[in-house]
Image (spheres, helix red, strand yellow):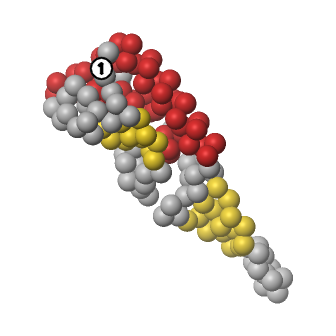
Amino acid sequence: MKKKILLKNSSGLFAILFGRSTRKRVVRKRVVQKKKPIVTPEDREAARVLVHARLEHFNQYYNFSYNKVTIRNQKTRWGSCSNKGNLNFSVRILALPRDAQDYLIVHELCHLKEFNHSSRFWDLVAEQVPDYKRIRHMLRYTAPIQ
Ligand SMILES: [Zn+2]
């Protein structure tokens, strides 16, 4: 008899554990990345609270104006900024360390002033996240898409 157990961790990875087969006595373990991890309303709310709190914190410094803030179940991007001043963040930001969360929030916030990745943009980011290069480098290993 085979049992299938589905587990989810905070970064949205799923582990499927196959129970041991009674005849062969093998335990197989497989980790897969689901296309659309299940995001609970609690995850979404926690991400929303976090993003709003850190946006307000950093915007006391920058004082830019933004429009809507949306939390999405985004697989390929951590965040984005539209030309209408709407900010979007992946719910998966919850799984990141605090300094990386802050970097992503400052990154999108700075796009309100510099809608590009010019050196002026990075200088603006560096005003609040001086070690942004280290964090960007680290994020390359932890991009939402696996
Ligand atoms: Zn950007």
Query: What amino acid is found at the position of numbered circle 1 in the picture?
Result: Phe
Q: Nearer the viewer, residue 102 or 69?
A: 69
Residue 63 visible, this angle? yes
Residue 68 in picture, x, y percent from top left: 38, 34
Is residue 142 at least partly visible in the picture? no
- Write down the quadrant of residue 114 in the picture: top left
Categorize mark 1 by other alpha carbons within 10 Å: few (<14), some (14-19), many (20+): some
- Residue extending farthest to the right is 22
Residue lying at 30% horizontally and 38% vertically, measured from the top left = 81
Left or right relative to 139: residue 115: left
Identify the image quadrant of residue 31: bottom right
State the quadrant of the N terminus.
Answer: bottom right
- Furthest residue in direction bottom, as rendered: 23
Residue corresponding to mark 1: 64
Q: Is residue 28 above or below residue 72?
A: below
- SS at badge 1: loop
Q: Residue at x 34, y 30 (%)?
A: 67
| Relative to 140, residue 7 above or below | below
Question: Which residue is at the front of the view, 85 or 113?
Answer: 85
Using residue 34 as the reference point, say whether residue 127 is left or right of it.
Answer: left
Residue at far top of view: 61
Image location (x, y in percent) of residue 55 = 42, 24
Image location of residue 135, percent across then percent down: 38, 33
Side of 92 where 18 appears, left or right: right
Q: Nearer the viewer, residue 1 or 108?
A: 108
